[in-house]
Image (tube, coloured by chain):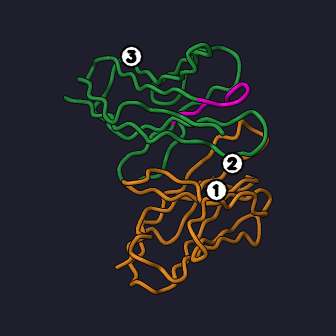
Amino acid sequence: DAGVIQSPRHEVTEMGQEVTLRCKPISGHDYLFWYRQTMMRGLELLIYFNNNVPIDDSGMPEDRFSAKMPNASFSTLKIQPSEPRDSAVYFCASSYSGSSYEQYFGPGTRLTVT
Amino acid sequence: AQSVAQPEDQVNVAEGNPLTVKCTYSVSGNPYLFWYVQYPNRGLQFLLKYITGDNLVKGSYGFEAEFNKSQTSFHLKKPSALVSDSALYFCAVRAPYGNNRLAFGKGNQVVVIP
């Protein structure tokens, strides 16, 4: 398997613009997670899905952030409008409930908002 | 809620010497414990896990970890460190029931000195 795939790998945008991050989980995995990593806050869980249904979005910082999972092989994280403080590395991870729930991470999207 | 503490910010070790990265956890019930490694500009990579059974768990790249229930610890060890082991190491814990969140520690930077 190709592992978790994220796109784009790098995104530079101006404040106020809409940003969409994409994720393809490992085939057969039924959980999908979105994380944000910064030097100040470390690794933060934003939201996670089980069988395409959002289970816990308590980590989503505010209404500017939204996430969807229209099918088992695709998820998006959208920021609208973006702000400089959203600059971070965003990771997607997936796991399978039939194993011991270890999560497998994608390579991340480095977002810079100017 | 589950949580992890990684008390040291940085661990410095000479190449060839034993490496230990410390982790203590807090969770209700028997824990699921994980170690991940992150190399620069990469996603987190799964190293090893403890779910049940032998307290000494062996993982990738010669790493192992020892589960100690009385001390609520899960320290990562490697008998002989390599320069290529220099990276950021994360400990994580999941409760045995309920939500599927992993609680990650803040990470430890390991520097192996040639």
Report the amino acid beneath label 2: Ser
**Chain bearing mark 2:** A
Q: CA distance from mark 1 to mark 2?
A: 9 Å
**Chain bearing mark 3:** B
**Highlighted range, magenta:** B26-35
Residue B29 image-quadrant placement = top right
Residue B66, horizontal then vertical, whole percent: 54, 17
Residue A75, horizontal then vertical, whole percent: 66, 68
Q: CA distance from mark 2 to mark 3?
A: 30 Å
The residue that label 1 is drawn on is: A33
Circles 1 and 2, Cβ within 8 Å, touching? The answer is: yes
* B62 or A100, nearer to the observer: A100
Report the amino acid beneath label 3: Pro
On whether disc 3 and disc 1 are found on a single subunit, the reply is: no
Q: How many marks?
A: 3
Q: Earlier in the sequence, mark 1 or mark 2?
A: 1
Report the amino acid beneath label 1: Phe
The residue that label 2 is drawn on is: A95
Q: CA distance from mark 3 to mark 1?
A: 33 Å
Label 3: element kind: loop
- On screen, B15 above or below A36? above
- On screen, B11 above or below B100? above
- In the rendered image of the structure, the colour used to display chain B is green
Residue shown at the point (63%, 52%) measured from the top left: A1
Q: Which mark is residue B79?
A: 3
Residue A23 image-quadrant placement = bottom right
